[in-house]
Image (tube, helix red, strand yellow):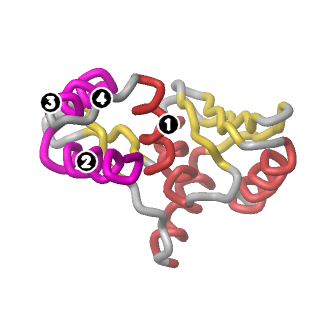
Amino acid sequence: MKSKRQQEILRLIAKYDIDTQEELRAKLAENGFNATQATVSRDMRDLKIIKSSGSDGRYKYVFQEPVNDAKLQTRYAKVLREAVKAVDVAIQLVVVNVYMGMAGAAAVAIDSLALEGVVGSIAGEDTLIVITKDNVSAERVCSFIKEAIK
């Protein structure tokens, strides 16, 4: 059931401009998949679904495939070099201080790199929090970012 529901989620976000989990949950229900918001949230995390700005400026959910292309990885590293001022670890969190307005770009770069142990990220205007599975992962991500901004 989980696999079929996740396939349906991918189909729905490809077909419709869905911008809330509640909207996605309702579309799932319309198609015979009754799921709680918590289940939808877990599925979205497992599927690496993120919000992205569309051509009309509105945000919508999209599937994000991990980046394997060396050229793209180089671009994301460049974004980090240009955006990040400082990075530190606080238990399972990596706190990334960036130049004003650059947190979103840095978050996209980090999320796109699909670093091992990263659960997700939250971006403000000048700060980005990267949530990891454990403190070992947090240290590894912090070291990666420090190396990328050298």
Tell me which amino acid carries mark 4: Asn
- The residue to which callout 2 is attached is 8
Which residue is label 4 attached to? 34
* N-term-proximal mark, 2 vs 4: 2
Does residue 48 sit above or below 23 in this rendering? below
Circle 4 SS class: loop
Question: Could you say which quadrant of the image residue 145 lies in?
Answer: bottom right
Type of amino acid under label 3: Glu
Residue 55 position, x and y percent, is: 16, 42
Q: Which residues are magenta?
A: 1-29
The residue pinned by badge 1 equals 42
Q: CA distance from mark 3 to mark 4?
A: 9 Å
- Write the residue at 67% across / 37% down: 131
> Horizontal placement of 65 versus 107: left or right?
left
Pick the front one: 2 or 108: 2
Residue drawn at (86%, 49%) of the image: 136
Whether 60 is among the magenta residues is no
